[in-house]
Amino acid sequence: WHKNSNKQKENLMSQWIVTPDKFLMEEEAKRLRRYCEDVAIIAKSKGNQMAVRNRLIIEMALGTGLRVSELANLKVEEIHIRKGQNSLTVNNGKGGKDRVVGFNNKLKVLVQEYLDYRNSTSSYIFPSERGDKMTRFGIGRVFKTMAARAGLDSKHSIHTLRHTYATNLYKASGYNLRMVQKQLGHASITTTTVYSDVLNQDLTDALENLE
């Protein structure tokens, strides 16, 4: 039993290594965003709601790092757009915890445009074609379709965008692990250190200084 228990622990630890293939490179993220934007522009001219919604799903995932279940459960009233810091409230996230997640003005503009454009009366930000809100699987499918059409590797999932957000924020914040932990809603900073393992500025500098 002990052997099995240790093996399970090792498996769990190995899953928690964020290798560079688990997040999008800058060029890949740009390609995905560009494709989603192009499709949304054409859709808007035809009065198509879904492609505009799908673009915001991708932008929201890349701009907030929300888990897929948090994206599915996000309500319009939980988004706070104001002068100063824009934020959203995640109610009952993983482990039943609530948190506030800040986001930038670029995303704010897209959220505002989407809310002005959409014709759904759903209280959820991402309604489905047939119901009040999208499921996690529906959101995952949207990502897979958009990613394939943008020419991204099929190994990526919607969760890739959370890893992409985390690595980008870690770099942009000057390698501030606490900030990343808070935004992602990790209960323990140990979970967040996976990003410092893959993006270590001191190691980069040290390697460059090697004789």
Image (spheres, grey):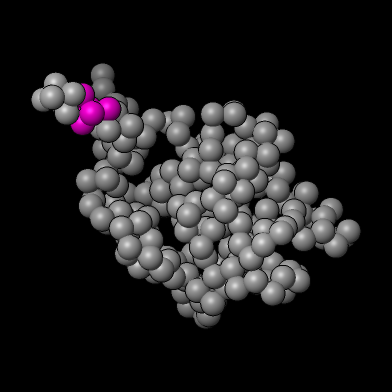
**Measuring 49% from the left and 40% from the top, which residue is drawn there?**
160
**Measuring 59% from the left and 49% from the top, which residue is drawn there?**
139
The N terminus: image quadrant: top left
Tell how many labels. 0
Using the image as rendered, state which of residue 63 and residue 202 is in the foreground.
Answer: 63
User: Would you say residue 65 is visible in this rendering?
Assistant: no
**Measuring 23% from the left and 28% from the top, which residue is drawn there?**
8
Vertical relation: 196 (above or below) 178: above
Q: Position of residue 115 (x, y in %)?
A: 68, 71
Vertical relation: 136 (above or below) 12: below
Instruction: Residue at the far top: name it.
Output: 211
Q: Was residue 10 drawn as part of the magenta stretch in this picture?
A: yes
Q: Position of residue 140 (x, y in %)?
A: 58, 44
The C terminus: image quadrant: top left
Left or right: residue 10 compared with residue 200: left
Q: Which residues are magenta?
A: 7-11
**Which picture quadrant has residue 182?**
bottom left
**Measuring 21% from the left and 31% from the top, which residue is drawn there?**
9
Q: Position of residue 190 (x, y in %)?
A: 22, 46
Instruction: Residue at the far left: name it.
Output: 2
Instruction: Residue at the far bottom: name it.
Output: 83
- What main secondary structure does the magenta stretch of the protein show? helix
Q: Was residue 65 drawn as part of the magenta stretch in this picture?
A: no
Left or right: residue 190 compared with residue 129: left
Left or right: residue 107 compared with residue 23: right
Left or right: residue 45 compared with residue 88: right
Q: Position of residue 47 (x, y in %)?
A: 85, 62
Instruction: Residue at the far front: name it.
Output: 1
Using the image as rendered, state which of residue 144 and residue 132 is in the foreground.
Answer: 132
User: Would you say residue 82 is visible in this rendering?
Assistant: yes
